[in-house]
Image (spheres, rainbow, N blue to C red):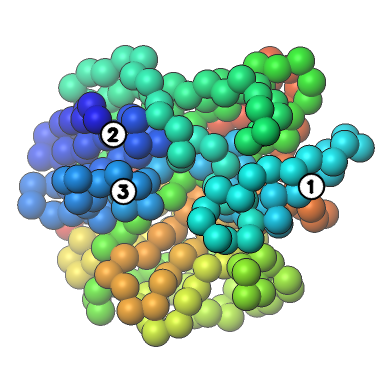
Amino acid sequence: MTRLDLRAGAATASILPELGGALTALRVAATDLLRPAAEDVTDPLGSSCFPLLPYANRIADGRFVFAGEQYRLPRNFGDHPHSLHGLGWQQPWSIETHQDNEALLAHRHDGNDDWPWSYHATQHIRLFPDRIVLTLMLTNSGKTPMPAGLGFHPYFPLDDATRLSFQADAVWLADDTLLPVSRAPADAFGDWSSPCAVRGTTLIDNCYAGWSGAAAIEQGPVRLSLTSGGADWLHLYRPPNETFFCVEPVTHMPDALNRDAPMTILAPGESAALTMSLGWSGI
């Protein structure tokens, strides 16, 4: 696979466009800010960050009704009962432009059983000495309206010193298959309104509603500031006893197509965008 390397001052980032448009490293000097991928990585789930589109997280049993029509999507995550994370993460992206500190990637879909609508997506990655900015844009290239969702899935290193903080209105509790079932207070898994230890022995795989659009991650002396434009939801994934966790800006809750939590609807030719900025200090 072709690897793109970006540089800005002491910051470097690596991208594998063919691996679902994934980042595979982000570091400043010798400090990894995202979990680095193995040199021989072949699965986006082993990457540093990948884009989510044309929907984020799960669609229950891959089934939904839209504009009076019933649709069924394939289950695309092993024996998991639901469709997961859309198409972009499992498709190669092409390189539109590449410069020292930025790259523009593209992904096109013509409509098939995986997703019946045609679309065109771009991911613009820009690296600066003190931050990285990723922008997803999704355009309905078909002839009928299309539901649309966007997200980013970054993996952060995790140890006993890691602290996370953000503001949200509530969190959705989930069933055994990780579909949301009930709304609960935002501190159900920890009081994230002030810096809180992330490491733990139980699974967190839950979506927060009414997210403010900002989160802070402390890794010892290193402070990361994550902000997003266009995302009202934040998905937190903390697998038990692992050395990573995920803080995912997304535009809708899991299984939104089957709930009273509408996704964006794009008319033919219309676009939606999502930006994630990750800044750093203390390095």
Q: Are marks 3 and 2 in contact (CB under 8 Å)?
A: yes
- Residue 109 in the figure: left or right of residue 223: right
Residue labelled with disc 2: 16
Residue annotated with mark 1: 64
Residue 5 higher or lower than 62, as above or below: above
Hey, which quadrant is residue 87 in on the image?
top right
SS for callout 1: strand
Question: At which x and y percent is residue 256?
Answer: 72, 51
Residue drawn where x is 30% and y is 44% of the image = 42
Q: Quadrant of residue 5?
A: top left
Q: Is residue 265 visible?
A: yes
| Image position of 123 with respect to 256: above or below | above
Q: Secondary structure at mark 2?
A: strand
Q: Earlier in the sequence, mark 1 or mark 2?
A: 2
Task: Give the residue type that dot 2 points to.
Answer: Leu
The residue pinned by badge 3 equals 47
The answer to whether 169 appears left or right of 4 in the picture is right
| Image quadrant in which the C terminus is located | bottom left
**How far apart are the two marked residues, 1 and 2, measured between alpha carbons?**
32 Å
Is disc 3 surrounded by few (<14), some (14 to 19) or many (20+) residues within 10 Å?
many
